[in-house]
Amino acid sequence: MSSERLIYLPLGGAGEIGMNAYVYGYGKPGQERLILVDLGVAFPDMDTSPGVDLIFADITWLKERVDQLEAVFVTHAHEDHVGAVAHCYEALGAPVYARAFTANIARRKMEEHGHPTETVRTASPWPEQINAGPFTVGFLPVSHSIPESAGLVIDTPAGRVVHTGDFKLDANPIVGEPFDPDLWSEVAKSGVKALVCDSTNVFSSHPGRSESEVGPEITQLVQDANGMVIATTFASNVARVKTLAEAGQKAGRSVVLLGRAMRRMIEAATETGILSDFPKVISAEEALDVPRANLMLIVTGSQGERRAASAQLARGKYRGLEVKEGDLFLFSSKTIPGNERGVIRIMNQLSEKGVDVVDDSSGLYHVSGHANRPDLEKVHALVDPQMIIPMHGEHRHLREHAKLAEAGGRTGILAVNGTMLDLTGNAPKVVDYIETGRTYLDGTVKIGALDGVVRDRIRMALNGHITITVILDEEDEPLGEPWCDTMGLPEMGSSRAGLVEVLEEDLNQFLMRAGAKTLRDEDKLEEGLRRIARQTAQAEIGKKPEVTVVVSRMR
Amino acid sequence: MSSERLIYLPLGGAGEIGMNAYVYGYGKPGQERLILVDLGVAFPDMDTSPGVDLIFADITWLKERVDQLEAVFVTHAHEDHVGAVAHCYEALGAPVYARAFTANIARRKMEEHGHPTETVRTASPWPEQINAGPFTVGFLPVSHSIPESAGLVIDTPAGRVVHTGDFKLDANPIVGEPFDPDLWSEVAKSGVKALVCDSTNVFSSHPGRSESEVGPEITQLVQDANGMVIATTFASNVARVKTLAEAGQKAGRSVVLLGRAMRRMIEAATETGILSDFPKVISAEEALDVPRANLMLIVTGSQGERRAASAQLARGKYRGLEVKEGDLFLFSSKTIPGNERGVIRIMNQLSEKGVDVVDDSSGLYHVSGHANRPDLEKVHALVDPQMIIPMHGEHRHLREHAKLAEAGGRTGILAVNGTMLDLTGNAPKVVDYIETGRTYLDGTVKIGALDGVVRDRIRMALNGHITITVILDEEDEPLGEPWCDTMGLPEMGSSRAGLVEVLEEDLNQFLMRAGAKTLRDEDKLEEGLRRIARQTAQAEIGKKPEVTVVVSRMR
């Protein structure tokens, strides 16, 4: 029991696509020195988290062991990998390592939150390595849909782990380094204990396509357009943004970048020297003087986000610019499951304005940033590890990826959030289950997903709300009649009288009949009033609303 | 102005996929005799209609002209075409005509609501015709994803209109009639004024596939399975249910139908003689005695509906049956946009139980029920109408379909809900815009989508709720301090004190400072209290909650 061990513990990302947070530890059980790989966010939705601003992995386990934490390593600058770095700074405080572009983005986040930017340290790519307690970590360049993505080569006394981060096999990614199979082989040559591997596209059976394939198609599309062209993609996909801008330029159009994230990403890529030869851009104000047939807008909001530039353009104007009949709107993106309604809303608003909408249904104008099934098989073979641990996926992705590993004659293990694996031996061993979950940033407050706060909001959304006010005098006798206020409920029920009036009458009946024992007992009285209100509402409007009972006593 | 005219007025379905309701009228302007084609529902979602049970088209215009209404014709038994028939019976009261299977389903709805089933009259297919005022209407059999779908041949003094209903071109639909191009040509031969045509799949560029194509694939899949097989599809797709059941039978499995809709649809199809040779089914109770490798469950809930059989099985048990490691779950369906999250939730729950999930991503196990773009072109040519009016689609579908018509050298016109067209002349003319919208069935009450009821519920879901109670004495002076109750809000804010305490303190400060004028003025006092509460909440928790203020006066 006292011998040292290498552990792996996903706190987020192994059970969802998003919210990545993976712990590695080395040392005696319970005293391991720890590093954290990625610290991302997930995004809320109305179905499960209305009113929530951001979702983090619950890092309680790590907070309780913050003295053991050596450093945080961030593989790339997507929000689901870097988004929580500033939000968790106060809890963790550890140095954050990332490559230059990612570090630039992380520092902007620190700055916004008033935290010291020195916490973020720029790492050079492999073969340079960073020492962090018993770990030596190198950033291995890999292609993805954002510049300077890296896999991590994590050397430990128990052997080498390769943590892929998000990746694809792209020989020509337009911006940033191509995937270099020779480099990966070289890293793997000395033997790899575990390959911890992106699972996002395990269900995509065809080999992945290169970022460079969309350029000619987009160029042609823009060339053929007559009105203004508006294109949206993920702002972080700097290569795509460049491709779009160049397509505009080739067609003799002035390029305008719209949306804060779009400008910030291009700025970061330029500052860090990744992006050069980006076509000249003009401001929205300057664009007002350019004929619309000579304009190419590249805008945020490919996922239908209500406040993004694309949604605002679809509804009307954005910074003085307006879409018109005969314009072309290109979604150079895929819709993340769950965002369909928002995207479709925009498409229809554009259609109402006579704008032609082109999306990726033809497969011509977007490629994925993740390795598909045959690509994963290639990487399994290239790295040839002792064991494969699928990460970055929902349960179904992780399970399928583990099966794929096994089908290739390798050890694959399904480890969802909270599963602590001991990787020291020849085969991975589950040694513990840690309680994990989600933390919501709700306004400015962090709350647990299971605290009941959001549950109550969902209930009010489904059932509406009634406030009941009752005043009791010094003798605990009702002073006047109870009254009701409703919110989110119809005014009239089945008895064709006002809902409030019917409620007040029934509640008054209840109060008149209630004995002294009930009237004196706070809980009993509240419970009785709530029950009557819900019964009456059910009879009147077929719903059982949420109820707040306020009993005021003149004692 | 006094000459008679033929009008077309969509009240629902021309602006969404769902909630179909199309009015045709003939007569002097304002005195037209009317018929309604289809009377369907749409389904609510958390984003826009939390707590709502069903959505109908707003039929106010029709209700105000109920004396002019001759009859309702229902093309087929999908909920978005027949779902509102019983809910609107009291408002309209007109006879409802449908073919036998559709009529069977419509009568069940009437029965459930306690309305006379005689309202629903069974129509025989073309060449039989029904007289309804100036209209003569025939039900022209057409293939779709439910038995006995019909296009309507609507003869009027101004010419013949063909209203397709939902349809596809299927020569071998397994159950029900194939699409018969000769019959359609024959109907069109004498000249068609307008083709009012399904637009759902206008963006699908390949020709549609036959229902018969999925049989061999499904049979093979079930044959190769080892554990229990569970398959889900739309219950109304009787052909698919039959194909699934036969695949089970061929593999030596006993077939179990689970879910109310599944049993009801098969019952209706059997009662009306459409379905014969359906494999013997056993009950859930009988299934408990059958080895799981010999079981094939066909279940409701292909769209991830929380209460359906598939969701219940994924969570645990349904009627004693349980999924286990090694079982196979087939989604023989496509996910309707907006339902992705629910479907993915089930897939992951099944994955957690070790169940293999197969969906339609391979394209093998599902075909659409709607005519694709090349199929639409075929029908345009076959019917060769004077004008084409796209229906059953979102704005983008209708627009694209109108463009397709124009591209084929025909007159296509975009008419969204509320657009009244005069079809009398050689070209369609927009003659009026009617106010249309959505009616929500909310519990047992019908409310307008814009009444503000649902808006308030959404706000509570996003912002939480505060109740403020203040008691004023006979002199309008505060009696004690104000107090607060919160719902859906965190307990603790940035000042690390209880949110309620901080609110109460700030509200008390306000009350102490408030002059007699404010204390006496109900609106002013309420407004002040609300403003303070929202300010304080914003400072403490970064949210501005919804507020109910209750002021009690001891006067």
Image: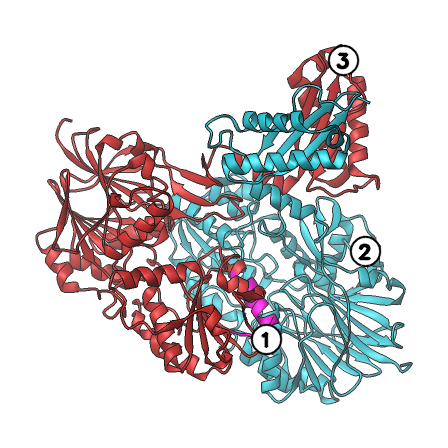
Chain colours: A cyan, B red
Side of B236 where B314 appears, left or right: right
Task: Tell me which chain the residue with mark 3 is part of.
Answer: B
Q: CA distance from mark 1 to mark 2?
A: 38 Å
The quarter of the rendered structure image containing the C terminus of chain B is top right
Of the pair A325 and B344, the residue shown nearer to us: B344
- Residue A36: give x, y in percent of width and height: 78, 67
Magenta region? B343-356
Side of B228 where B30 appears, left or right: left
Residue farthest along the left direction in this orientation: B190
Residue B349 is one of the magenta-drawn residues: yes
The quarter of the rendered structure image containing the N terminus of chain B is top left
Dot label at residue A89? 2
Residue B545 shows up from this direction? no
Of the pair B184 and B316, the residue shown nearer to us: B316
Task: Tell me which chain the residue with mark 1 is part of.
Answer: B
Looking at the image, tell me whether mark 3 or mark 1 is earlier in sequence order.
1
Foreground label between 2 and 3 = 3
Dot label at residue B515? 3
- Residue A380: give x, y in percent of width and height: 63, 83
Relative to B269, residue B160 above or below? above
Task: Tell me which chain the residue with mark 2 is part of.
Answer: A
Identified by mark 1, the residue type is Gly
Identified by mark 3, the residue type is Gly
Give the prevailing secondary structure in the magenta stretch.
helix
Label 1 Cα neighbours within 10 Å, binned few <14 / some 14-19 / many ≥20: some
Identified by mark 2, the residue type is Tyr
Dot label at residue B354? 1
Contact check, label 3 and label 1, Cβ < 8 Å: no
Tell me which corner region of the image, top left, top right, bottom left or bottom right, holds residue B436.
top left
